Image: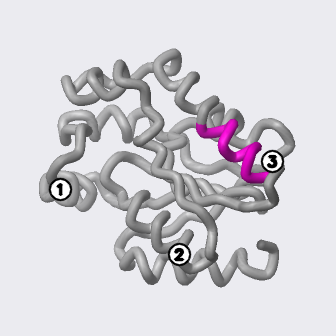
Amino acid sequence: MDAIVVMGVAGCGKTSVGEELARRLGWQFLEGDGFHPPENIAKMSAGIPLQDEDRWGWLDTLAAHIVLAKEARAPIVVSCSALKRRYRDRLSAGGTRVLFVHLDGSRDTIHARMALRAGHFMPTTLLDSQFAALEPLESGELGIVCDIDASPAEIAARVSSRIAPAA
């Protein structure tokens, strides 16, 4: 395994689960939001959903980090919405082996979580656009779907126990 991408709509817990998963595995963690260009952050902060063309450079940057991790034989955990199949294909290009962990939950649960968090650029008004763009994992994709009703520690424990023998 070269990388694990913890994916899902905004507010589903990607960072919390990703950090805990990386800690458990002893891998580096990359917060995908930290790689968005200023233009993307400005759009999202203004309540404007990103389009595919807004995401390509960001996804290519994250994919490059995954390739570097593979070359260094130092697997990483990355938080990234990875909402569409073509985004996930872009992240796993270059011969990398990427496991996608889709954090799945109801709109109401995620909206409530987003309303409680402070200091994040993503407004709750964009949640519906995130759900509209979401393409669930398909057969043929290397992935696990996890319900967000469990705590980040419980989710990370489940995922790490499933991938540890192959890591």
Report if residue 63 lies within the magenta region.
Answer: yes
User: Which corner quadrant of the image does residue 92 belong to?
Assistant: top right
**Quadrant of the frame with the C terminus:** bottom right
Q: How is the image coloured?
A: one colour
Q: What secondary structure prevails in the magenta region? A: helix
Q: CA distance from mark 2 to mark 3?
A: 21 Å
8 above or below 1?
above
User: Which corner quadrant of the image does residue 91 belong to?
Assistant: top right
Position of 93 with respect to 129 (left or right) is right
Nearer the camera: disc 2 or disc 3: 2
Q: Are marks 3 and 1 in contact (CB under 8 Å)?
A: no
Q: Residue at x 56, y 64 (%)?
A: 145
Which residue extends farthest right? 95
Report if residue 8 lies within the magenta region.
Answer: no
Instruction: Report which residue position mark 2 lands on.
Output: 23
Residue 148: give x, y in percent of width and height: 39, 68
Which type of secondary structure does the marked residue at label 3 adopt? loop
Q: Residue at x 60, y 75 (%)?
A: 159
Please state which of residues 113 and 147 is positioned toward the viewer in this rendering.
Answer: 113
Residue 78: give x, y in percent of width and height: 56, 53
Q: Could you tell which of marks 2 and 3 lies nearer the N-terminus?
A: 2
Instruction: Report which residue position mark 1 lands on.
Output: 117
Q: Residue at x 39, y 66 (%)?
A: 16
Q: CA distance from mark 3 to mark 1?
A: 33 Å
Q: Are marks 2 and 3 in contact (CB under 8 Å)?
A: no
Image disc number at residue 66:
none
Identified by mark 3, the residue type is Thr
Nearer the camera: disc 1 or disc 2: 2
Instruction: Report which residue position mark 3 lands on.
Output: 96
Q: Which residues are magenta?
A: 62-70
